[in-house]
Amino acid sequence: AGHEPGIHSSLDFRWAASLGKLAYPRRQLIHFAKDLDYTGMAKRYREHARKQGLVRSLEDKAKETPTVARYVDSLLVRWNRWDPEHKEQATADLERFRELGFDVMYFFPKCPGEYIPATDSYGLSIWQAYLQPNPDPEWIAYAREMRERGYLIQGFISMIVQNEGATGYDPDLFALDADGSRNQWRLTMARDVERNRDVLDAIKKHKIEFDVFYYDAYSANCGGVEDFSPDHPCTMRQCFETMNQALADARREGLMVTGELARFYCMGVCDGFF
């Protein structure tokens, strides 16, 4: 968009394809107003988004998921990776924050997959980490202990990638690009709801007690990816719908759900953004 006061205004836009086609009707709403700044545009969009059911206040979300209210007033403390040797130091740091008067949201563990057999290892808590048949009981017990001490526990998950050799690996999960080649690292989102359900069931089975579940890469810049596979095609619009369904399923389990960046398509169902 361009605007030269008193001279002219210009607008250019590009429709995103749906698996290479304009597969459904598109519509754009343009609002004109005098002296409209960014704040005014944001307020105008919020008004429109509210009518579409995209906007829910934190107060409304907290009525359904009480953790939201406490999350807003807490200090997020992140322990990047689970290391039993540093457990006492990490715990002492938490106590220091509490002594300073902070309520603490403990972002832990980002990497429970680091301390498992080498035949089933990966660097981040991607979805496969939670499907291990025998996850490390020590970090689960530590998370439970911290929760019993009154800390909120935030877990971490990434649904968009997988590691070969790890639990649940399936080469058919990779998305296909427009030319029919396999995407180098991105998975189809056509099966995210099913995989997410498996993760939520595993968390319950292993009694992993999270208050918040952070969906890494959901609503991020990389977001979803179109899948041109004839077996599990997925448009970008379906990617958005799948993300929202996965987040909603986690909320129904009593979890507060957070994402990476505030995106219009998930600001109603996602409780917060990192």
Image (tube, helix red, strand yellow):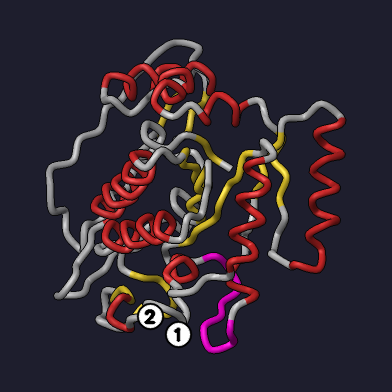
Is residue 141 or residue 34 the one in the foreground? 141
Give the residue displayed 80% in from the left and 53% down from the top: 90
Is residue 48 or residue 53 the one in the foreground? 53
Q: Is residue 74 left or right of residue 227?
A: right
Quarter containing the C terminus: top right
Quarter containing the N terminus: top left
Q: Position of residue 264 (x, y in %)?
A: 39, 36
On screen, residue 8 above or below 47: below
Give the structural element (helix, strand or loop) at label 2. loop
State if disc 2 and disc 1 touch (CB < 8 Å): yes
User: Label 2 is placed on what type of residue?
Assistant: Tyr
* Measured Cα–Cα span from mark 1 to mark 2: 6 Å
Give the residue displayed 33% in from the left and 20% down from the top: 50
Q: Quadrant of residue 171?
A: bottom left
Tag count: 2
Q: Position of residue 95 (x, y in %)?
A: 82, 40
Give the residue displayed 41% in from the left and 38% down from the top: 254
Is 236 in the magenta? no
Is residue 68 or residue 216 the one in the foreground? 68
Q: Which mark is residue 122?
A: none
Q: Is residue 199 visible?
A: yes
Most frequent secondary structure within the magenta stretch? loop
From which residue to which does the magenta span run?
A: 117-125
On screen, residue 21 above or below 24: below
Q: Quadrant of residue 11?
A: top left
Residue picked out by circle 2: 169
Residue picked out by circle 1: 164
Give the residue displayed 38% in from the left and 39% down from the top: 251
Q: Is residue 135 left or right of residue 16?
A: right
